[in-house]
């Protein structure tokens, strides 16, 4: 498969200066008219160049954070990187694979799901005190459960817990509800936004939803281009 970017170009563009400093970045895609999905999924908006960026951001992460709804919709399995990514991580003193951390209130997940059974590292499940206790106990057999908040997941505690577990480099892959929650709590350090050269129309959702109003100024830290697709990096 042909590539749009050289590996070194992407690593130079997205590597943070100090891995020991906590850093929560999100990676999202949107059409030029603001749609986050095509027919309910992000896959209809992306392409090979976006997949390159997606893979490099995972390579650089200690933990990949995803909402349970997005995980089910996009068909996540065990979070396993390719051999080139594993080799690079070993050379840089990192674990072979990042940890998958799933954020869920209802805990509507099956312990037999590939995201648990095929995971190279034990996943994390992040929830709150009012989540179903019986289901929580069931899922504790296949994941480490973090309770962050009383009636809803507290983004500040979520971030603190991941950093305390030695995972300061946090990559959020969405979805829009989770991203909106993180932005609303002002715990987001970076947004990597792929602008797909499509006009989607319809009633597709934005990259944030169901969240408090957040008026957060950011600065443009990088721009890459692959034909008509743009890759923007914004920092708080």
Image (spheres, rainbow, N blue to C red):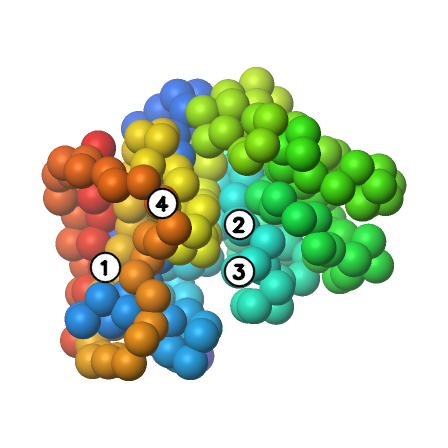
Element carrying mark 3? helix
Which tag is nearer the camera, tag 3 or tag 4?
4
Percent position (x, y) of residue 218? 16, 38
Depth check, front residue: 223 or 143: 143
Q: Which mark is residue 231?
A: 1
Q: Which mark is residue 70?
A: 3
| Picture layout, residue 6 above or below residue 188 | below
Element carrying mark 4? loop
Q: Between marks 3 and 2, how big is the CA–CA gap?
A: 7 Å
Q: Between marks 1 and 2, how big is the CA–CA gap?
A: 21 Å
In the picture of the structure, the residue carrying the numbered disc 4 is 211
Contact, mark 3 vs mark 2 (Cβ under 8 Å): yes
Depth check, front residue: 60 or 150: 150
First-in-chain label (4 vs 2): 2
Residue 78 found in image quarter: bottom right
First-in-chain label (1 vs 2): 2
Number of other residues with Cα within 10 Å of mark 2, as a class: few under 14, some 14 to 19, many 20 or more:
many
């Amino acid at each position: 498969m042909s590539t749009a970017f050289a590996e070194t170009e992407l690593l130079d563009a997205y590597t943070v200066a100090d891995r020991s400093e906590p850093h929560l970045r999100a990676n999202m895609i949107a059409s030029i008219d603001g749609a986050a999905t095509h027919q309910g999924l992000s896959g209809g908006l992306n392409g090979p160049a976006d997949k390159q960026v997606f893979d490099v951001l995972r390579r650089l992460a200690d933990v990949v954070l995803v909402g349970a709804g997005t995980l089910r919709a996009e068909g996540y399995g065990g979070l396993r990187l390719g051999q080139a990514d594993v080799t690079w991580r070993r050379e840089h003193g990192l674990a072979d694979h990042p940890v998958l951390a799933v954020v869920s209130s209802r805990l509507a997940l099956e312990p037999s799901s590939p995201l648990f059974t095929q995971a190279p590292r034990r996943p994390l499940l992040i929830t709150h005190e009012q989540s179903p206790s019986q289901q929580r106990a069931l899922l504790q057999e296949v994941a480490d459960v973090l309770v962050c908040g009383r009636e809803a997941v507290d983004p500040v505690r979520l971030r603190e817990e991941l950093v305390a577990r030695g995972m300061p480099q946090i990559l959020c892959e969405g979805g829009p509800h989770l991203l909106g929650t993180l932005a609303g709590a002002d715990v987001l350090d970076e947004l990597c936004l792929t602008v797909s050269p499509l006009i989607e129309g319809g009633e597709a959702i934005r990259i944030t939803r169901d969240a408090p109003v957040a008026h957060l100024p950011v600065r443009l830290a990088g721009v890459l281009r692959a034909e008509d697709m743009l890759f923007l990096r914004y920092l708080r």
